[in-house]
Each structure stands twice: as structure tokens, then as C-alpha cells.
């Protein structure tokens, strides 16, 4: 009696599977992985053969996951994450703080908190090469896009090490000259004053929600799509705005109109792979982040 021969999965084929799943294109996958399109097609076929199922549906607009492909996706991302963690652990070692660390965070935190402190970090850890990624909405620590993240939203994945790092408080601010030319009663500090607001496409943001819920006069002096623009508008004397306190503290012309305990606070979360906790370079970056949060009275 002959046993049926089964094909063994080549784990490297998962790289090709993930790339096609993310790009929906053999051509883009080939360019990303620097191989031919026929190689991509062959590796996907080999994976489908070893699993005895179809993973993609081919349409004119691209390649899309079947139900089986969707089921495989989370497993493949977990494998990718583990392999990435293994490579990083041995690249950086547990002793010397050296190697590349990909840090993901919000652009606000990057520009006003992290980058100003980087010269000292680089002086302390010259062997660490830091890559700063600010597209946190599309960056996944689980998917191995980043090694460590400082986030305003707490992720739920079990494979991550998550701890509360601090709080980002926000208050209502205005330029001194705006307050002088637009006086208001002490018990009604918003009366007769206009806000610099978020564009409607950003209505989900906590600051935009606070404005919508708490401010009666919705007349806007200016609607913007970035915090940098709001900060410039406030400094120019256009009106009031909800700004993070640590940023406003760096602006000598701004005056607090409504304190943070009457506006909002957002928790900050430090996120990394559980497998990378022992890495010296990850520890160095985590300690650096906690230090600057403490310095800004945010921890």
C-alpha cells in the first residue's frame, strides 16, 4: 500500500503571499521583491498546491483573497512578525544597543516632542539607526512595519507588549493680542470669540468632537486639515483652538483660555513586540521616549 505524497509548505512562499495580498498585483509584488512576475506566480501556485486550496481570485482590477486566503492572512502575518523579531533580536543582540529601530508615532509627537530631543539620543547611542515613521494609521507593529510605536490608540493584539506611557492633555489657547481685541466675560471665555476648527473630514478627532459637543457658536474663523496649520493660525491671532498642552508650552505668545481638565486628555501607549522586549536597542528607544515624556510632564 502506497502512502500519498504530500507537498511540504515552503515558508518563504508566505512572503510572496503577503506581498500579493497587500498590493493585489503580481507586477507590484515582483517589483517590491525584485523578482520576475513569473516567479511570483509560480510561488503562489506552489503555496496553493501545498495547502490544497485557492488563495486568490483574479479579476481585471487585481488579485483578491478568497475565504481561505483571508483565513491564511492572519497566520502569515504572525509568522512574518515572529521571523522579523528573531532577525532583529540577533541583529541587535541583548548586550550592545546597536542596529536599526523603526519607531512609529503621530506626526504631532514626532515634530514637537521626539525630533527636538534626537540630537542627545544620537549622541548617547551612535550605533542605533532610528527610522521615524509618522503614518501611524497605516503602520502595524504586528505586521512588522515598525519595531516600537508611541500611539494615541491602544491596540488589542495579543502578540504585543503594551504599556501606558503617559497622557497628552489638550486645552483651549489663543494669542494674547486676539484675547485683547476680543474681550469676553471671565465666566464665559468663549463668548464672542471664534475657533480655528478641523475640517469636516477630521470630525472623528477628539479635539473636533469636543468643539462640536461643547461650543455653542459653531461659526469657524478657519477650518484646517492639520495641527501645524491650526498652530500657525492661533499664533497669527485668528482665534481660539484646542491644542496639546506640550505644544502650547513651546509657544510664548499663547495663553490658556480653558484648562485641560475641562477639555480633554488622551492616553499614550508604548507598543512593541513581546519578542523584542529584551533587545538592548529597543530598551534604549523605550527609555528615551519615557524620558522625554517625563520632561514634557506627560508621563
Image (cartoon, rainbow, N blue to C red):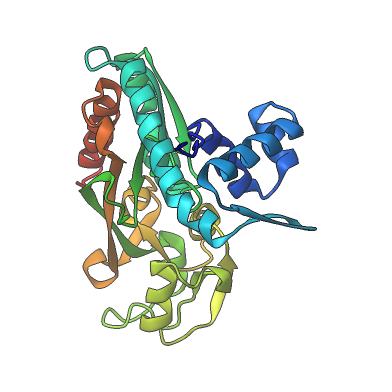
Image location (x, y in percent) of residue 239: 49, 68
Q: Nearer the viewer, residue 278 or 153?
A: 278
82 displayed left or right of 54:
left
Could you say where residue 191 lies in the image, as x and y percent from the top left?
40, 83
**Please, which residue is most extreme toward the bottom here?**
216
| In this picture, residue 63 sits left or right of residue 100 | right
The image shows a total of numbered marks equal to 0
Question: Residue 131: horizontal and vertical position, in percent?
Answer: 46, 29
- Which residue: 21% across, 68% down? 261
Residue 112 in the figure: left or right of residue 14: left
Quadrant of the rendered image containing residue 91: top left
Give the residue displayed 53% in from the left and 65% down from the top. 238
Which is more toward the observer, 282 or 15? 15
In the depicted view, which residue is nearer to us: 174 or 73?
73
Whole-percent x and y of residue 102? Answer: 42, 32
Q: Pick the residue in front: 299 or 72.
A: 72
Residue 112 in sight: no
* Occupied quadrant, residue 156: bottom left
Amino acid at each position: 500500500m502506497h502512502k500519498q505524497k504530500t507537498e511540504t509548505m515552503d515558508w518563504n512562499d508566505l512572503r510572496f503571499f503577503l506581498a500579493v495580498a497587500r498590493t493585489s498585483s503580481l507586477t507590484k509584488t515582483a517589483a517590491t521583491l525584485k523578482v520576475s512576475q513569473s516567479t511570483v506566480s509560480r510561488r503562489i501556485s506552489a503555496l496553493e498546491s501545498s495547502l490544497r486550496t485557492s488563495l486568490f481570485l483574479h479579476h481585471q482590477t487585481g488579485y483578491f483573497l478568497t475565504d481561505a486566503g483571508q483565513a491564511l492572512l492572519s497566520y502569515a502575518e504572525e509568522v512574518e512578525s515572529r521571523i522579523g523579531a528573531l532577525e532583529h533580536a540577533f541583529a541587535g543582540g541583548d548586550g550592545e544597543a546597536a542596529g536599526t529601530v523603526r519607531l512609529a508615532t503621530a506626526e504631532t509627537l514626532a515634530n514637537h516632542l521626539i525630533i527636538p530631543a534626537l540630537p542627545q539620543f544620537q549622541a548617547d547611542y551612535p550605533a542605533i539607526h532610528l527610522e521615524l515613521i509618522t503614518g501611524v494609521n497605516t503602520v502595524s507593529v504586528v505586521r512588522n512595519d515598525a519595531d516600537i510605536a508611541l500611539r494615541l490608540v491602544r491596540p488589542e493584539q495579543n502578540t504585543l507588549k503594551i504599556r501606558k506611557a503617559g497622557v497628552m492633555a489638550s486645552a483651549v489657547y489663543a494669542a494674547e493680542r486676539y484675547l485683547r481685541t476680543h474681550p469676553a466675560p471671565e465666566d464665559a471665555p468663549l463668548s464672542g470669540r471664534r475657533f480655528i476648527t478641523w475640517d469636516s473630514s477630521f470630525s472623528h478627532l477628539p479635539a473636533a468632537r469636543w468643539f462640536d459637543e461643547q461650543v455653542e457658536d459653531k461659526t469657524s474663523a478657519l477650518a484646517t486639515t492639520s495641527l501645524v496649520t491650526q498652530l500657525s493660525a492661533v499664533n497669527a491671532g485668528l482665534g481660539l483652538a484646542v491644542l496639546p498642552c506640550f505644544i502650547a508650552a513651546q509657544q510664548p505668545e499663547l495663553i490658556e483660555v480653558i484648562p485641560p481638565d475641562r477639555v480633554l486628555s488622551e492616553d499614550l501607549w508604548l507598543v512593541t513586540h513581546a519578542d523584542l522586549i529584551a533587545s538592548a536597542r529597543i530598551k534604549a528607544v523605550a527609555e528615551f521616549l519615557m524620558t522625554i515624556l517625563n520632561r514634557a510632564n506627560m508621563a
